[in-house]
Image: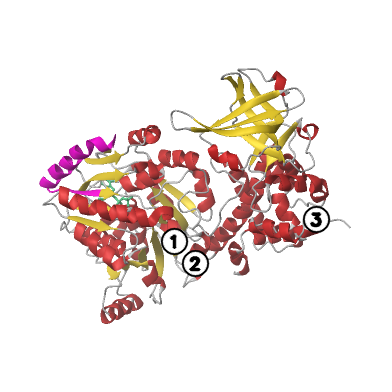
Amino acid sequence: MPIRLDQSVQFLRGVGPRRAEAFARMGVRTVEDLLYHIPHRYLDATSVTPIAKADVGSEVAIVGRVVSKAVVPTRKRLRIFRAVLKDESGVIECAWPGQAFLDRTIKQGQLLLVTGPVKYYHGRQVVPREQVVLSEPDEDTESEDFVSGLVLPVYPATEGLSHRQVRRLVAEHLDEMVGTVEDTLPGDLRREAGVPGLQRAFVLLHRPSAPGEWEGGRRRLALDELFDLQLVVARARHLAKAAKKGPTFEIRKELTSALKHALPFELTAGQRRTIREITADMTGAARMHRLLMGDVGTGKTVVALFSMLLAVENGYQAVFMAPTELLAEQHARILGELLAPLGIQPETLLGKLSAQEKAAVRERIASGGARVIVGTHALIQEATDFERLGLVVIDEQHRFGVEQRAALIEKGKAPDVLLRAATPSPRTLALTLYGDLDISVLKEKPKGRAPVRTGVRGSKDREKIYAFLKERAAEGRQAYVVYPVIEESERVDLKAATTMAEELGRRLAPLSVGLVHGRMKSEERDDVMRRFRDRELDVLVATTVIEVGIDVSNATVMVIEHPERFGLAQLHQLRGRVGRGAEESHCILLCDESAALLRLKRFARTQDGFKIADLDLKERGMGELAGTRQAGGFSLRYAQLETDGDLVVAARGAALELIARDATLSSPEHRALRARVERRYERGMELFRVG
Ligand code: ADP
Ligand code: MG
């Protein structure tokens, strides 16, 4: 009987209950899962050299049995693992410096494939770059013949299921499995992207005949995954833009012009352009669903305010939603200052208000007395009736995923939506995370802003740095000291941050030093931040909780401890907390890891958030980027956004076009596609069930 892809792997010859269980631990349950369980690396065994011909100075791949082995100490306290390999032509020694642990996995009698350079050290010696066990002493031989001429795939393995066993199983069943694969990707898209068919892709991945061939296979799987994601995103976009029911805006130039005259500065060219883009959306037929993206300090708040006033002068209410209470308060203050000359007072809906006060604010919102309203996401989403809501501005939206954004739309009378993001993203990433939105980008900062002077220093400079902090404090300035706390070592890190705060308190006396971290209750944390804002504290020791939004323009120095433990984009985000006033500001990276110096120095030289975001994407790849996982659970397994930009663009074009024709993917010819999207992005499919 032919196998089916949706069958359990256990139906495959060679897989019993025990192995099926081991497979399940790696997420492989069905035959199809096994096809998608692709090698995580490959060994180039296209030309295996007979051991006798492994010449000093050459790069080789050799296959031989382990005839002896030992762990050898050296004078430098480095322990070397050594093994002698033998084939029909001769013997050679292999040496793995500093890898004594290999003694536990490499055993006498095993057949090994080893790749690496041949050096001279008391004779010929291979220093392996990679090695793979081809067979155990008592196993029937996976012979040299079998290996030679191949690129050897190495699979993710688990206890009870070695990579060899996985490889054998895949090799044995590959043709049979591949034969049943159906390709649901539109052929036009596949050809445009220049990737192979799905069957061919699996062969390239599992049985490449030359090094590098697998890349074509990977790109094919990446395209599938990006296309599925873009379908979800295009659907969200379709829903968002189609839902124009309520507001219609006209250009009136009343409040907006008044604001322009009242501002103490000229708008930058970028601000004028983005205001035009937003105005076109708001006065146009489709609903606005736009992202305003730009580095901190590029003047996004002012742009957002123009859009709010456009709504207000058309007789609508405008809401500004911030992620936290503290940020809402801060925005209310800033908007209040900018609006004062126009005689408009923003209404604030804050958690700290008494029940009675809240009720009064809600009443003014419901009756229409309040025109500009500021509050937290939570408070505003929670049961607030508006008299006539026209525009919602959402701050720091990277905490929102595609579906959460879509959920907002369904609420109420479908107001226009403007999201503000202070985290620049590279274009391909933006199209992925924010593909449902139109994007306006603000690049330049207002003229006359002094850059944050960034320097890399070591522990030996600590005294000098503390003296510098004291001098700045004597001038009335404040400083942040940032300490990394990562999940894996949270307890130790928190302790270190706490100790650091205590020590700084002593060493910087009589300056007052405060501490905030993510494990504090949010009220407690807000309280410390407020004290810092009100200048009761001179120095704030903080973990990355200060990354978003806190705006204390009197803080002009930031010291970052262990900067090597942060991604570049995160460092940039942190650095954005200083340099907010007219004063020159400083960011000091305190690093003793010589390996990290180069990238930190590169970071120190550039202030451009978009450039840094590009570097960050290249450095870390998609998987780890902050915000990725929260973006609706759309983690990408095969796509690498740093290199697959062309695939993103192609997938996006095809998805938009397809959703325009069949918005719910319900026509029979799209059934298979819909099923695939459903399997991959289960939650995203919710979007296809509404509207
Ligand atoms: P963002 O929200 O993008 O971080 P803001 O809108 O908060 O930036 O602006 C940062 C600071 O720059 C504010 O103090 C704001 O008043 C000021 N600002 C905004 N636009 C201009 C401009 N065109 N010229 C000078 N200063 C500006
Ligand atoms: Mg701002």
Instruction: Report x, y in % for residue 360.
Output: 28, 80
Say which of marks 1 and 3 sits in front: 3
Image quarter hosting the C terminus = bottom right
Say if 195 sits above or below 524 in the image.
Answer: above
- The number of discs equals 3
Q: Residue at x 80, y 48 (%)?
A: 173
N-terminal-most mark, 2 or 1: 2
| Residue at the disc numbered 2 | 409
Q: What residue span does the magenta drawing correspond to?
A: 455-480
Distance CA(mark 1)–CA(mark 3): 52 Å
Q: Amino acid at mark 3?
A: Leu
Instruction: Report x, y in % for residue 535.
Output: 16, 56
Q: Is residue 530 visible?
A: yes
- Answer yes or no: do the residues labelled 2 and 1 have beta carbons within 8 Å? yes
Say if 503 sits above or below 353 in the image.
Answer: above
Viewer-closest of 17 and 514: 17
Viewer-closest of 465 and 257: 465
Secondary structure under the numbered disc 2 in the rendered image: helix
Image quarter hosting the N terminus = bottom right
| Residue at the disc numbered 3 | 12
Quarter-wise, where is residue 546 in the image?
Answer: bottom left
Answer whether residue 246 is magenta in the image: no
Distance CA(mark 2)–CA(mark 1): 8 Å
Q: Residue at x 49, y 60 (%)?
A: 401
Instruction: Report x, y in % for residue 429.
Output: 51, 47
